[in-house]
Amino acid sequence: MPGGFGGPPAGKIDAKEKVDLAKLKKFWQALWPYLRKQKWSFIAIIFSVIVATIFQLWGPFLVSQIIDEYILTQRFGELLKMLILLGVVYLNASIFMWLEDFLLARLVPKITSKIRADAYVKLQSLPISFYDREPFGNIMSRLTNDLDNLDNALNTTTTQILSGLLTIVGALAMMFYQSAWLAAATIITVPLTLIATKKIAAKASKYFAQQQTDLAEINGFAEETLHATILIKAYGTESKITDKFNQLTQKYYQSNFKANFFSGLMMTAVLILNNLNVVILGILGGYLAFSGWLQVGIFASFLQYQRQFTRPLGTLANQFVTLQLAVISGQRVFDLFAYQSETNPAEPVSAITLCRDLKIENVDFAYVTDKPVLKKINLQAKAGEMLALVGPTGSGKTTLSSLLLRFYDPQQGEILFDGTNIAAATRAQVRELIGVVLQDVHLFSGTIADNIRFSRLTATDDEVIEAAKKAHAHDFIMHLENGYQTRINGNAVVLSQGQRQLLAIARAFLMNPPILILDEATSNVDTLTEQAIQQAMSRLLQGRLSLVIAHRLSTVKNADQILVMRDGEIVERGTHKKLLAENGFYAQIYHSQDADLLVPHFANEILH
């Protein structure tokens, strides 16, 4: 579940996390393959930064020459040429700065879009166990907030850091070239600037990281509660949910305010120290100029170099904070690629079928070590049979179906399709043989026809309609405004639960697989519709095997085998009549008229 009701914050970033050389190296190694594919654009950007910096550093030098050699000496005839040269220099600086921005605007979206696409592909390849552990808000935060941080860093931080470092070195060299005394006076305040920015940057970094954590928590909470709107309204908890959301937004406001406050404070501190430095230079430079030890033009250009030298100090401190957050965020995205994808055998079988029988032998399974969910499961069913799983909540029914789909693999035992261990086939080969209808139906944004066709994308319109008719969904579809072309907005509530269930059943009919898994598949339809579906299913199931998970025993009375599960074990098996005659656990469920009525009775036993 996403972080919300006291759960762990989704997308959490440790506010105390620091970026050391090892983390920076790991981040760079993950990012480099994407940069390498755009290396010429990257080289062009670096070239533009270097050339733009050279032109910017050349400008003040020309200013000193113009003042000392042309204005003060009144060589006005040649002054125009120098002014034109100065204009060309600054124009070139502007052109290459624009070129840098233009190339970045083209390069960065390509890189981040590729990373986002690769991350999404990776998410599709990860096993269900990953989603069992990882909060949804955390996953969304990696694809959105974290990639936005990386995008921002690539767009601005990397070039600004490079430009800032080049400018500082170049300006310092030019200052010492012009006047060692003034250069020494300029760097007097540098230690103070570095100390101030380091301390303030550490605070800003902490709150920027906290801001990302708080934002991810808001996203997770919003996702969780918006999906539960009906439940929230039904229980009248809107005000409580709103209060909780306001608390989260207030928490985000505090971290956002502090992050921006310290970021602004850092620039203010740099500005104050820069102004102090200008005062020192003004006093010393004025004295040297009046004493005849310093030319006026050099003093004027020196003030420009001083600004070029000191201005990047604050910018660099601010950019290093952004870079640190981007490295942390980027690594969270790249960490996705370290998760183990669903595995397949190195040399899978060429084909796997389920035309004869399904056999499960001595299967043990646990989500967590030492906490078994299934114990010594043995069963056999032939094609065309209906196999029913019944039992209290938590007895392992749905887990068993997940093993058939190879969402998980058993720790012990084998699952055999026509005598072939499914572990010897690819997961895709196994899943192509199985159609699934779940109690909780997920619909996608699109048309009714698109949602039915989801199980077989190549199906024709006629095949879609035929599947809907078999599922007894055709009549209600034709009563919709645009029939099969009626658009629905994903899981928005525009269809009843029963109608949504019928669409899910139509998907299974369209797929027409050798085995069907029906997990409470008719729980949301009325009795008459359920009976009609059962009749249609009886035709579909000829020569095929169905696994029905049910609490409502009306759906399984005619099953060829009923397996009664309790605490991860099959405690009874047989036909409906046989199990009633044994007067055991199944008979208790049956005579209660509804298996759900037994859940409170067995609650303590299940919990313990």
Image: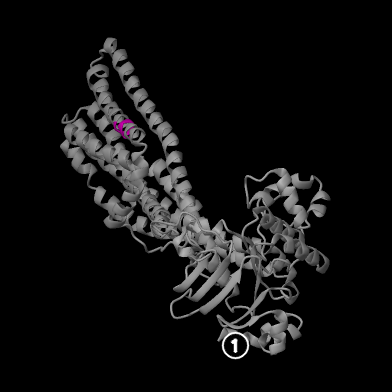
Residue furthest bottom in the image: 583
Specify the principal SS of the magenta part.
helix
Q: From the viewer's perspective, is 210 left or right of 137?
A: left
Q: Amino acid under label 1?
A: Glu
| Residue 43 x %, y % | 31, 34
Is residue 216 rendered to the left or right of residue 295?
Answer: right
Residue 415 x %, y %: 50, 69
Task: Say left or right for 581 vs 301.
Answer: right
- Residue 476 position in % (x across, y down): 81, 54
Q: Residue at x 20, y 27 (%)?
A: 295
Asked whether the viewer can see residue 3, the reply is: no
Q: Is residue 482 magenta?
A: no
Residue 443 falls in image quadrant: bottom right
Q: Residue 48 sits in which quadrant? A: top left
Nearer to us in this view, 162 or 444: 444
- Magenta part of the protein: which range? 46-50
Q: Dividing the image into 4 quarters, which one contains the C terminus? A: bottom right
Above or below, 390 relative to 95: below
Label 1 sits on a secondary structure element that is: helix
Left/right of residue 605 with respect to residue 288 in the rendered view: right
| Vertical arrangement, residue 370 with respect to residue 296, above or below | below
The residue that mark 1 highlights is: 605
Q: Is residue 593 visible?
A: yes
Using the image as rendered, state which of residue 42 and residue 236 is in the foreground: 42
